[in-house]
Image (cartoon, helix red, strand yellow):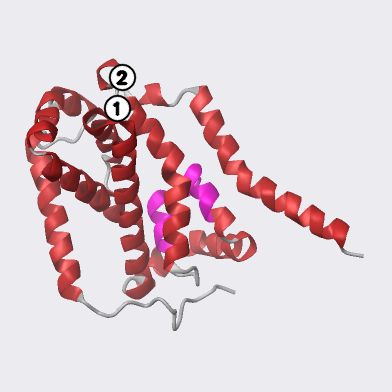
Amino acid sequence: MRLKPDNHPDTPGRTPWRWMLASALLVAGLYWLLRELGGELSFSSLRSHHDDFLRLVDTHPVAAILLTFLLHTLLAALALPGASLLMLAAGSGFGAALGTLLCLSGCTAGATLAMLASRHWLEPVVRRRYTRQLDDFDARVAADGTAYLFSLRLLPVLPFVVVNLAAGLTPMKTWTFIWVSFVGMAAGTFVYVNAGTALGHVRELADLHSPGVLASLLALALLPWLAKLLTRRRADKASP
């Protein structure tokens, strides 16, 4: 039986004008970036405009920070390609720490917007489009809760957009979705942003997927499941 978020305690008020304003700003930012990149958001175009981006960061740091955050939010909310390239650019312009914080915050914000849209406006469309994935997701969330979402954020077995939309149709609280997503995506975001600090030495995105990095992410993904298994075993031993 599928869980439903009816009468959800964190249902926001209806403020469509705010959503429209935020969407307009995000679309404008994406349009500006695509125009600067010659209409193509690709690794080669990113490398060719690397100096331009660094100049923007040096001359208008606040605007560059806001633009990076808003663009990452838009890419995550609409499941558009280019997030990995934006993380590389953020690393080259802001460094590993600030770049990771910007991209991670933007990605979490975008994912949350998609989750809330699914919960409050897009439920019929989502159920029709992702019926099979929703059945599996509901069952796993009911059984494993935040541990399942945490693992999906570390190792995305399901597409990013499916996780966001499916989570909106469960009773999971918005704040839980936010912090689990933020923590779960931290390691993967740092890998890309940190690589961006040496963007001149990265020839293609495949260079980031080394066996060591993937093994580390796999180990992190297994941590919540291992903790849950140990907790169950302790409870079994403690029970008479």
Tell me if 82 is positioned left or right of 223 in this view.
left
Question: Residue at the location (23% across, 32% down)?
Answer: 89
Stretch of the chain drawn in magenta: 149-166
Q: Position of residue 187 (x, y in %)?
A: 45, 38
Which residue occupies the extreme bottom position in the image? 7
In the displayed structure, 105 sits above or below 135; it is: above
Residue at figure coordinates x 37%, y 63% from the top left: 115
- Residue 161 counted in the magenta span: yes
Residue visible at 32% across and 77% down in the picture: 12
Q: Residues within 10 Å of mark 2 (few under 14, many from 20)?
A: some
Left or right? Give the position of 5 relative to 106: right
Q: Could you classify mark 1 by the number of other residues whose Cα lies within 10 Å: few (under 14), some (14-19), or many (20 or more)?
A: many
Q: Position of residue 156 (x, y in %)?
A: 47, 45
Percent x, y of residue 165: 40, 62
The reply to whether the C-beta atoms of the residues labelled 1 and 2 are less than 8 Å apart is: yes
Residue 202: which disc? 2
Name the residue located 80 percent from the left edge and 53 percent from the top edge.
233
Magenta-colored stretch includes residue 90: no
Q: Position of residue 172 (x, y in %)?
A: 49, 68
Alpha-carbon span between mark 1 and mark 2: 8 Å
Image quadrant where residue 111 sits: bottom left
What numbered label is drawn on residue 196? 1
* Foreground tag (1 vs 2): 1
